[in-house]
Image: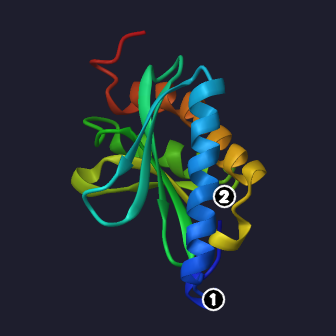
Amino acid sequence: MSMTTDALPPATPAELERIELQIEQWLEEQLQQNPCVQSIERDTDSGECRWMIRVTAEEKEIFSIWFHLRQRTLHVETYLMPAPEENLAQTYEYLMRRNLRLNGFSFSIGSEDAVFLVGQIPVQWVTEAELDRLFGSVYAYVEQSFRPAMRLGFASRYKD
């Protein structure tokens, strides 16, 4: 999503509380009804409003999706893979070209050069349908991108 979030008005404490409850309810529904959702943990140590959703899939068997409610945005993130060990240029080229086909998300390089999939929406956009779209998009993008990226970045070690 290409937007300057600083231009967005910050949510009021009451709005953030309402959105937090909405996310909590949606997550509980996912835990009960979505067979891909294995567990949900609330980050209570940081003092921030963050949830970790453990997901099972086929291409990448288990991964976590983080929802982080901020004053202006809902940030969504998942770890795709460690830093590539070989074919760096080709691996990053593949991921950058994939960015062109991602709706509201992009691949980025994080700590220790690991590859993450990140996105965010304004808090005012948080609805059940939008949470479904965010979750479904992360799931689909990981399923589509994990194996090709690993084949490039770990060609000599990656076996089907």
Give the camera-side residue of 38 and 142.
Answer: 38
Give the camera-side residue of 35 and 152.
Answer: 35
Residues at marks 2 and 1, CA–CA distance in whole angstroms: 20 Å
Q: Which residue is mark 2?
A: 104
Secondary structure of residue under mark 2 = loop
Question: At 46% across and 24% down in the image, what residue appears?
Answer: 60
Name the N-terminal-most of marks 2 and 1. Answer: 1
Q: Residue furthest left?
A: 112
Where residue 140 appears, as percent x and y from the top left, is 64, 34
Question: At 53% across and 21% down in the image, what residue appears?
Answer: 57
Q: Report the colour scheme.
A: rainbow
Where residue 110 appears, as percent x and y from the top left, is 32, 56
Where residue 105 appears, as percent x and y from the top left, is 60, 55
Question: At 67% across and 50% down in the image, what residue appears?
Answer: 131
Q: Is 93 placed left or right of 29 in the picture?
A: left
Secondary structure of residue under mark 1 = loop
Give the camera-side residue of 118 and 89.
Answer: 118
| Residue 120 visible in the shown view | no
Q: Is residue 29 above or below residue 76?
A: above
| Residue 17 visible in the shown view | yes
| Count of labels in the image | 2
Q: Is residue 71 above or below residue 155?
A: below
Question: At 66% across and 54% down in the image, what residue appears?
Answer: 100
Where residue 115 appears, as percent x and y from the top left, is 38, 47
Instruction: Tell me the mark number nearer the camera, choosing from 2 and 1.
Output: 1
Identify which amino acid the numbered label 2 is placed on: Gly
Q: Residues within 10 Å of mark 1 (few under 14, many from 20)?
A: few
Q: Quadrant of the C terminus?
A: top left
Q: Which residue is mark 1?
A: 9
Q: Residue furthest right?
A: 129
Identify which amino acid the numbered label 1 is placed on: Pro
Q: Quadrant of residue 44?
A: bottom left
